[in-house]
Each structure stands twice: as C-alpha cells, then as structure tokens.
Image: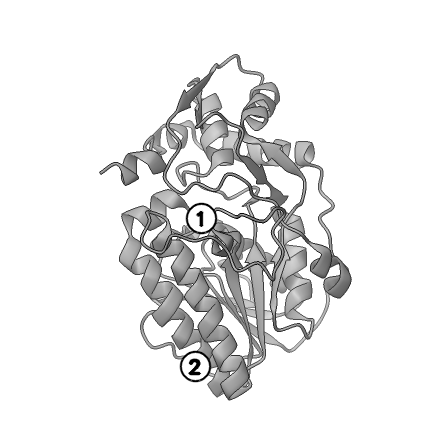
Amino acid sequence: MSQTNKHVLITGAAGFLGSHLCDRFIAEGYAVIGMDNFITGSFDNLKHLENHPNFSFIEHDICEHINIEGELDYILHFASPASPIDYLKIPIQTLKVGSLGTHNCLGLALAKKATMLIASTSEVYGDPLVHPQTEDYYGNVNAVGPRGVYDEAKRFQEAITMAYHTFHKVPVRIARIFNTYGPRMRLNDGRVIPAFIGQALRGEDLTVFGDGSQTRSFCYINDQVEGIYRLLHSNYSQPINIGNPSEVSIRDFADEIIELTGTDQKVVYKELPVNDPLQRRPDITLAKKILKWEPKTDRAYGLEQTLQYFKSLPKEKWYKAEHKTFINYIKK
C-alpha cells in the first residue's frame, strides 16, 4: 500500500464506479470520504469498507450545501443517475445533480483549494456524426429528446467546471467516460451488459433493439479506474476520453453473451429507442499521449468476472430486476 496524507471526497460513492474508486484510493493510502444519498447507489457496494480506518461515509444529497470538516485535496464528482432507466424515472434529479450538485462541489473545491475531477460521459456526443469520437467533436444532441436530461446535465457540468477553472483558477479534470462494466453493476440498470446477462440467467430471450447493427465499446472497471486515477494526477484540464476503442455490434454481442452463459436463448428484436446512439467508440489518442493509458483487459475475461459476480448474488435478485427497459419509459 502506498502512503499519503491526502484526503479525497468521492460523491456517488455507493454506485458502481464510485465504490471501485473508493477501493482504489484506499489501496493507495488516501483518506477517503464517501458521499451518497442512495437514490441509485447501494450500501452493499461499500459494506466491505465499513470499518476501514481510512474510510468514512456521509449520507447526503449534494444538491444541498456540502460541508466537510478539515483538509480536502481532491473531489471526484461521480454522483448522478447513469442509466436510461434511472434518468428517465428521475429526470429532474438528474438535471439537478449535474447542475446544482456540480456547483456545490466546485464551491467546495474552491474553498478547500482542492482539485476537482468530474465524471462526464460519452453521451455529450449524443448520436454522433463523427466516428470514432474525438474530444474536439461538439456532439449531436437533442436537448428536448428523451435522453436530453442526462446529456444536457453532463454538458452543463462540463461548462460550469471549465468556468470555475478559467474564472476561479480551480484545478479541474474532465473524464468523458465511455461504457464501463464489471462487478457491482445493477442487474436492473437497463444497460446492455446487465440486461443481457440478467435475461440469460433468468432463462429469457435476449432483447436487441433495432436491427442490432448499432455498436458499443465496453471498458472493464479496473481499466476505467486506472484511467481516472491517472487523469486526476495529471495536469490536463480539458476533457479527455476514457474508454475502450474495441467496438462490437449489439447483435454480435448478444451472441457473445449466449456463448458465455452457455444458454440457448434466442435473440428477439424490438423497436429502437428514440435518439439511441448508433455508433459509440472513443478515440483515446489523447489518453495514450497524456496519461500513458490504454485499456488492458480482454473483454472475454472482463465479461467472465462480471458474470461470476451476478451469479454470486442471491437468486431472488435475478428476478427482482426491473424488466422494463428504456423503450418502456419513453413510450409513456
């Protein structure tokens, strides 16, 4: 374990990414303060840290004023609904955490003279007309479409973060995170990996929206955390893509999951949701150059680890997963 006297606040600490970041910073010897209001996170993700001497937790909604006693060196802002099912159920909270929540975190960073890293997203590119997506692409986003609450929350988050950097000189880092997967994902979060694995575990057919030709790029959690860790400790203040450029069609990916799980489910096709991106692949040239980072984990290995995590859950959780999907919500 590395030793440091640095203190870090991680918002959204009970979520998938946030909890893994807590693990990484504790392993590096940081004093970690986790913060979450459990609107989408779960304390199960942090239970193993409950009695750790370098970990403390505050249940709090960051859309309200944040008060942290003592020194604070870094803030990692990962509080936000991050799946279509979540942000379509709670659209106003999604917009508030990207705006008010980010504003409060930036105010705290200014007061504490802390470096602030925000979890932005590939969704700022919308349904991209440029492929692969580079950081200088402005995006193709429908502000009033069904995904707009998340896309625009994150675009505003980037804008106010950069404003604090240019006006108040707050040191900032902006991670544009592409699809990430691994243990601690929720089976009911509506994204394709838990959706497919959950359907396979329940013996259901796998649901592909559209004709399945749309593509995604999946980055394993350990690689993502390494990229974020390196970005925080860099001096780079502009947005930077962190994701895996290995691209796969959803149709082919469904076949991978069927082979992985050893099931004989069929693939069924349903209507493509409105504004669902047809292509998603990061250009990570900047990350390679500035962070000396690129993903290392083979998808077959990462998927096996994810499958074993889901299989380790009590079986009733397989069936408590919401069977509604993104398209069910946008049709309401």
Mark 2 Cα within 10 Å, few/some/many (few <14, many 20+)?
some
The x and y percentages for residue 166 are: 54, 83
Specify the quadrant of the image occupied by residue 54.
bottom right
Amino acid type at image mark 1: Asp
Amino acid type at image mark 2: Gly
Mark 1 Cα within 10 Å, few/some/many (few <14, many 20+)?
few
Give me the residue at 48% from left, 35% from top.
Answer: 192
Q: Nearer the viewer, mark 1 or mark 2?
A: 2
Give me the residue at 28% from left, 39% from top.
Answer: 329
Is any part of residue 12 visible from this angle?
yes
Is any part of residue 28 visible from this angle?
no
Q: Which residue is mark 2?
A: 107
- Quarter the C terminus occupies: top left
Specify the quadrant of the image occupied by residue 213.
top right
- Quarter the N terminus occupies: bottom right
Q: Is residue 89 left or right of residue 103?
A: left
- Front-lying residue, 28 or 234: 234
The x and y percentages for residue 317 are: 39, 32
Q: Is residue 66 left or right of residue 131?
A: left
The disc at residue 12 is: none
Direction left: furthest residue: 332
Number of numbered discs overlaid on the protein picture: 2
Element marked by disc 2: helix
Does 201 sit above or below residue 154? above
Q: Which residue is mark 1?
A: 44
Disc 1 to disc 2, C-alpha distance? 30 Å
CB within 8 Å, label 1 to label 2: no
The x and y percentages for residue 37 are: 35, 60
